[in-house]
Amino acid sequence: MKMLLRITMPNEPFNSMIKNGTIGNVLDKIMSDLEPEAAYFTLEDGERSVLLVVNINKPGEYVKYAEPFFLEFDASIKYEIAMIPEEFRSAGIEVIGKKYT
């Protein structure tokens, strides 16, 4: 299943890493370790953010994706499970709908 991570990084230590020239190496290390399906660097509420799309097989796998950002950037993270249309169709929503109508 897919998981969307919204990672928000405070200015520190990010600014210091930019100034001392280590930000590229840190981000390269994290991205090569995590191998996300997609990664988008953006701003969220005026703060540096990364949106990752990853594939997980069990819920606890989110730790692998979150911890590098917690440890390196003191980041805050939100995550959501996401489904492609085929997964949504096979979820049994019609059965649930009949049960509760």
Image: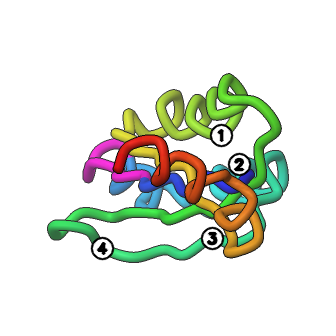
Q: Is mark 2 in CB contact (under 8 Å) with mark 3?
A: no
Question: Label 1, on which residue?
Answer: 65
Question: Label 4, on which residue?
Answer: 43
Q: Please tell me whether residue 49 is drawn above or below residue 75 in the rendered image.
A: below
Q: Earlier in the sequence, mark 1 or mark 2?
A: 2
What residue is at 69 percent from the left and 67 percent from the top?
A: 89
* Marker disc for residue 8: none
Q: What distance separates the C-alpha of mark 3 from that of mark 4?
A: 13 Å
Displayed quadrant of residue 64: top right
Question: Label 3, on which residue?
Answer: 39
Q: Earlier in the sequence, mark 2 or mark 3?
A: 2
Q: What distance separates the C-alpha of mark 4 from that of mark 2?
A: 19 Å
Q: Secondary structure at mark 3?
A: strand
Q: What distance separates the C-alpha of mark 3 from that of mark 1?
A: 12 Å
In this picture, residue 12 sits left or right of residue 80: left
- Which is more foreground, mark 2 or mark 3? 3
Q: Is residue 16 magenta?
A: no
The local crowd at label 4, few if under 14, some if 14 to 19, many if 20 or more residues have their Cα within 10 Å, is: few
Q: At which x and y percent is residue 91?
A: 67, 53
In this picture, residue 57 sits left or right of residue 25: right
Q: At which x and y percent is residue 22?
A: 59, 54
* Marker disc for residue 30: 2
Q: Secondary structure at mark 1?
A: helix
What residue is at 49 percent from the left and 51 percent from the top?
A: 98
Q: How is the image coloured?
A: rainbow
Q: What distance separates the C-alpha of mark 2 from that of mark 3?
A: 11 Å
Res. 26 in view: yes
Amino acid marked by disc 1: Tyr
The local crowd at label 3, few if under 14, some if 14 to 19, many if 20 or more residues have their Cα within 10 Å, is: some
Q: Please tell me whether residue 99 is drawn above or below residue 37 in the rendered image.
A: above
Image: magenta residue range: 7-13
Q: Is residue 8 magenta?
A: yes
